[in-house]
Amino acid sequence: MSPPTKSNETSERFLEDDSIGHTTSSNVQPAEPVIVNGQERLATTTSDGELSFVGLIPPVDKGHGVASEERQDDGPPLSVRSTRKEPTNPVMAKLGEMMSNLHTDDNPDGIISLGVAENSLMAKEIKQFYGEAFGKYFREQDLTYGDSMFSSQRLTKSLVKFYNHYFQPYDKIEAGHIATGSGVYGTMNHLLHVLINPGEAILTSAPYYLGFDAMCTKRCGGVLVGVPMDIDADGWESEGDVETRMERAWKKCEERGLKVKVVIVTNPGNPIGRTRKAHPTDHRGTLLMNFPLSYFRSFFLPIVERDTLLAYCRFAEKRNLHLISDEIYALSVFDNPNLPNTVPFTSILNVDVERELGRTFSKKRLHVLHGMSKDFCSNGLRFGSLISQHNPECIRAVMSIALFMKVSSPADTLFYGLLSSPSPELSETSDTETTMTTIKSATDAINVSQPSEIGDSFAAWFVAENRRRLTDSATYMTQWFTDRGFKVYPANAGHFLWVDFADRVGWDTWSKELDGFHGVFERRVYIVRMNCL
Ligand SMILES: Cc1ncc(COP(=O)(O)O)c(C=O)c1O
């Protein structure tokens, strides 16, 4: 992010904190390796076109990851890799505190979470469904290690139908193309473990999903490089000229001896990925909120266009990189009356890259991630899919470590039920009681030996109804903030609401915004700061 007004706050605090740099402060120094506790690290933050770096340059030759021989009074030390300090991000630092004291009906004085992408709009319905369906689908066999290293064979078959239906891949997806794990978080980390060597770099557009820091650096030892998005004529971020900015980042990495191996595109993007022209802004004090919709019904995030996807493909091919497309919000795309004429979601799997680019493209480099957390309001069940259609070696390598992240059989059972059960016959105007009764009738009608087609499944009803509620929520929440004099930037996918707080509460520098973040937290509300994405 590069707000012209938030300046002269350097990355020094990151160094003082003994941490690695972040995609946070503005006007910081370019990344330089620094020695912290005898280890070489990159430390900097992004701003004004500068890259951000998160990760460690591992002293591979000296035995990366080997426990230090230093004596400790209280026994042998833990490994270097588990004890080295990772980036201190003020938002992440408060996450654990928030989670252990979450506001609930039983804990009304707890912290209200507005900073985690959780969708509770369909929570009642999906809970009812899972409760009814579990008993129908759970088998004795589900008490064993199962019939596959990944998800059960029956779920994998359903996933094949599900992805072919909703992602419209150019090459049909087959069971052997899919590896599953406990959430996209874990699955992406496993994938990166397979794709990169410690110290190799991963490029992604900044601002980016906060979780990428850990996903790209922990265990696999990658260095995550945030490449600032373009600022358009109105001063708003967009994917813009992907090739130019990625190429520039690639060269900068090469100059400092960092080998780039992977580029990640998030589509629809968390938090921005904006390809359309947005409203003018100076970005000051702009906050991104992931509202649990039971509190403030809201939502957002933008979609990456086909041309942009092609630009990523061209860049990946030119520099011989793996291209990961994180499509976890694929089915949470909705109509937003405040944002007409938006592009529909296009999975990168839908693109016939060679024909559309008119040049060679190795599909071996393409890996797509999706999961059930967001589109099916089921974050806690932990399910993620990796789809790699032309790289069996990659799938095999992920399989060799698959048991570390195997989906539990209850979650496997519930997702199988979701994709295989009949849709409830409900209209948009059904009240809650009718909805619950109808869901019960639909689960009573489950015929375990005759799974529904995806288009007629409970999942299909859920996706459509969730989208409708997302529209309502986005509209409601936009109006709520607008009525109170806040500027809101509409989008049409995901769980995000972008609100400019600068004018209303005077958070017009990064440090004021950080103070604001802490102030709001003290009042027991957890939000995401714009400059900590
Ligand atoms: C872009 C993106 N990728 C991955 C994840 C992690 O999802 P999961 O719950 O499947 O681990 C999130 C969660 O917020 C996300 O926003």
Image (tube, rainbow, N blue to C red):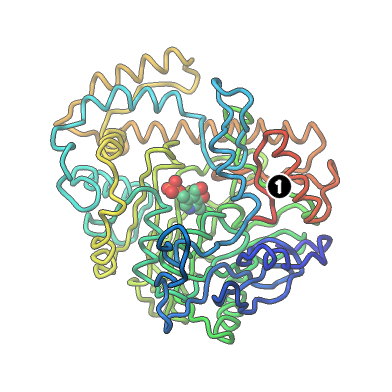
Mark 1 close to ligand 1, CB under 8 Å: no
The image quadrant where one finds the N terminus is bottom right
Residue 371 percent location from the top left of the image: 39, 47
Q: What element does badge 1 sit on? A: strand
- Give the residue type that dot 1 points to: Leu
For residue 73, above or below residue 137: below
Residue 252 picture location, percent across and down: 60, 82
Q: Is residue 380 left or right of residue 336?
A: left
Give above or below for 347 relative to 14: above
Q: Position of residue 122 (x, y in %)?
A: 47, 29
The x and y percentages for residue 440 are: 32, 17
Q: Which residue is found at the position 67% from the left and 40% from the top?
A: 338
| Most foreground residue, 473 or 185 | 185
Q: Quadrant of the C terminus?
A: bottom right
Do we see residue 330 in this rendering? no
- The answer to whether 517 is drawn above or below residue 253 in the figure is above
Q: Is residue 231 visible?
A: yes
Q: Nearer the viewer, residue 334 or 235?
A: 235
**Left or right of residue 357: residue 522:** right
The image quarter containing residue 80 is bottom left
**So how many labels did they put on this image?**
1
Most extreme residue toward the front, as rendered? 73
Q: Which residue is pictured at 69% across the width and 73% down the height?
A: 50
Label 1 CA crowd tier, 10 Å (few <14, some 14–19, many 20+):
many
Residue picked out by circle 1: 287
Question: What residue is drawn where x is 56% and y is 81%?
Answer: 253
Between residues 322 and 219, which one lies in front from this camera angle? 219
